[in-house]
């Protein structure tokens, strides 16, 4: 089982997520879902990565029909999500 991601969590190169879904929260912070926007951040080669989105999610847990993002899921830039702002809600792979 892996941690569910929240809006504001970062990928391995500092891209910060934001999500349009506000229906389900943990500690008052929205849970991140597939397609959430990821801020501009360092890329493997210059220039900095333009805005990306989260591109993988669980196929077992959904919010309004959209998969929930987890630690380790990849963004469209290729960077995995590697931090979670919470430590107690997990989902199966």
Image (cartoon, grey):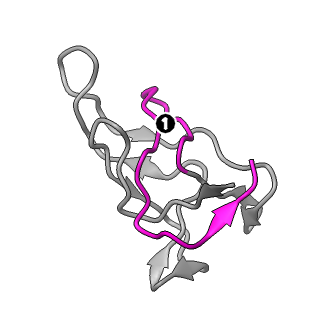
Identity of the residue drawn at 27% across and 43% down: 14
Q: Is residue 44 left or right of residue 85?
A: left
Q: Is residue 78 above or below residue 4?
A: above
Residue 57 inside the magenta-drawn segment: no
Name the residue at 43% across, 50% down: 37
Q: Position of residue 26 (x, y in %)?
A: 52, 79
Query: Which sits in the foreground, 92 or 5?
Result: 92
Residue 71 lies, in percent from the top left, at 53, 49
Whether 88 is drawn above or below 42: the answer is below
The answer to if 75 sits in the magenta stretch is yes
What element does badge 1 sit on?
loop
Find disc 1 in the rendering and name its residue: 75
Q: Residue at x 58, y 52 (%)?
A: 70
On the rendered structure, is 3 left or right of 47?
right
Asked which quadrant contains residue 29, the reply is bottom left
Q: What secondary structure prevails in the magenta region?
A: loop
Q: Quadrant of the N terminus?
A: bottom right
Res 18 → quadrant: bottom left
Of residues 88 and 18, the one nearer the viewer is 88
Residue drawn at 53 percent across, 61 percent down: 32
Residue 12 coordinates in the image, percent (x, y): 35, 38
User: Where are the magenta residues, as a range?
Assistant: 71-93
Q: Is residue 49 above or below residue 92?
A: above
- Vertical relation: 66 (above or below) 63: above
Residue sticking out furthest to the bottom:
28
């Amino acid at each position: 089982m892996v941690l569910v991601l929240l809006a504001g969590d970062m990928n391995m190169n500092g891209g910060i997520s934001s999500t349009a879904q506000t229906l389900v929260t943990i500690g008052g912070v929205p849970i991140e879902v597939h397609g959430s926007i990821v801020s501009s951040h360092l890329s493997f080669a210059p220039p900095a990565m333009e805005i990306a989105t989260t591109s993988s999610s669980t196929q077992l847990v959904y919010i309004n029909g959209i998969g929930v993002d987890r630690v380790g899921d990849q963004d469209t830039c290729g960077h995995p999500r590697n931090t979670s702002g919470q430590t107690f809600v997990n989902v199966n792979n």
